[in-house]
Image (cartoon, grey):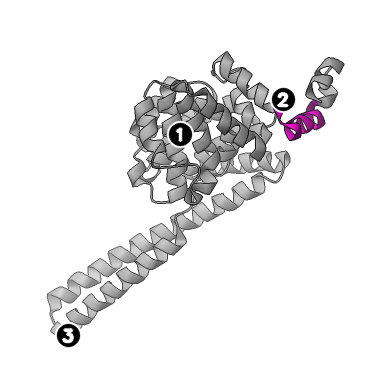
């Protein structure tokens, strides 16, 4: 089948900061700063005005740095959008990111490249992520890098490594609700698959795939819930969520059917059964793979 939902989620790229929140904070900070200058001028205190002058220069430098950083994130987001237009565009974007890495050695370029490579060659994506020196990753990106590596490791059945990364992810430090929810899903799946089911349940109680606020994180949260329910032998709930995924996009179930997925044979069999029982899924599979099936296989899918 085509790329898995984990891969599709990974392809979204590093999320840019929330503009609405930033503008509101900047307006408040600006108003406070203007007020301080007004008080300093009214007091005619030379020392206070010198202090505010130095502080103004420092803040101006910090603001310029943040603006340049934010512009880079916008460029990356636009590059990711173009990369999703076609396989050729994706390959071009990967080459462009390699060139950017050679110039500025920015870890966000490497992270984006791994996300795009995941759709073409998961092994190459893993190698790219493994090449990242976590000691050189800026503090503000540590959670995102850990989360991305954990996502890829889960797809490649490197579950123990994913769980160790999940242990280090600080969800409370991630401000954007949907990004935090995707990271929470990664952590919950990693823990559910390494016998930390209670911890996974605690996260899923906070980040429900059925909540509208986490709409864009719905699929990875459903994956996490499926693995948590499977660990607790709640087969009916597993089947129910698989049916939901199948109705939204039958290709999501490829997550449980890849040769190196690491899921138990019983879970794979359940996913296959859900596919066979869904007429739209059967039709889609015939359209995609009909030419590769023998006569008996085609009859079984009708």
Q: Quadrant of the C terminus?
A: top right
Q: Which residues are magenta?
A: 276-289
Q: Examine the rendered structure and indicate whether residue 166 appears above or below residue 259.
A: below
Residue depth check, mark 2 versus mark 1: number of the one nearer the observer: 2
Determine the CA span between mark 3 and mark 2. Answer: 78 Å
At which x and y percent is residue 258?
A: 62, 21
Q: Which of disc 1 and disc 2 is earlier in sequence?
A: 1
Residue where numbered disc 1 is placed = 186
* Mark pair 1, 3: CA separation: 54 Å
Front residue (pair 263, 56): 263
At which x and y percent is residue 191? Answer: 40, 27
Residue at the spot of label 3: 42
| Residue lying farthest to the front in this orientation | 236
> Mark on residue 48?
none
| Magenta stretch secondary structure, dominant | helix
Q: Work out whether 295 lies above or below 218.
A: above
Give percent across and percent down for residue 23: 41, 66
Quadrant for residue 26, please give it.
bottom left
Residue 276: numbered disc:
2
- Observer able to see residue 41: yes
Residues at badges 1 and 3 in contact (C-beta under 8 Å)?
no
């Amino acid at each position: 089948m085509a790329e898995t939902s984990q891969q599709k989620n990974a392809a979204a790229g590093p999320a840019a900061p929330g503009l609405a929140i930033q503008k509101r904070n900047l307006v408040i900070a600006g108003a406070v700063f203007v007020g301080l200058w007004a008080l300093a001028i009214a007091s005619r205190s030379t020392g206070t005005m010198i202090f505010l002058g130095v502080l103004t220069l420092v803040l101006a430098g910090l603001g310029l740095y943040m603006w340049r950083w934010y512009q880079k994130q916008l460029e990356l987001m636009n590059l990711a959008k173009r990369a999703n237009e076609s396989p050729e565009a994706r390959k071009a974007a990967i080459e462009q990111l390699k060139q950017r890495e050679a110039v500025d050695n920015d870890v966000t370029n490497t992270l984006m490249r791994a996300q795009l490579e995941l759709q073409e060659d998961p092994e190459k994506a893993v190698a790219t992520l493994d090449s990242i020196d976590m000691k050189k990753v800026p503090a503000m990106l540590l959670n995102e890098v850990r989360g991305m590596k954990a996502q890829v490791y889960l797809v490649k059945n490197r579950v123990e490594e994913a769980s160790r990364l999940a242990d280090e992810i600080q969800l409370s430090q991630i401000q954007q609700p949907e990004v935090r929810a995707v990271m929470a899903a990664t952590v919950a799946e990693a823990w559910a698959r390494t016998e930390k089911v209670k911890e996974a349940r605690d996260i899923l109680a906070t980040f429900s795939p059925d909540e509208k606020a986490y709409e864009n994180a719905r699929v990875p949260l459903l994956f996490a819930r499926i693995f948590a329910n499977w660990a607790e032998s709640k087969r009916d709930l597993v089947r129910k969520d698989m049916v939901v995924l199948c109705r939204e996009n039958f290709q999501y179930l490829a997550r449980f059917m890849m040769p190196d997925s690491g899921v138990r044979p019983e879970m794979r069999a359940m996913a296959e059964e859900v596919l066979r029982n869904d007429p739209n899924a059967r039709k889609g599979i015939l359209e995609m793979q009909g030419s590769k099936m023998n006569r008996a296989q085609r009859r079984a899918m009708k």
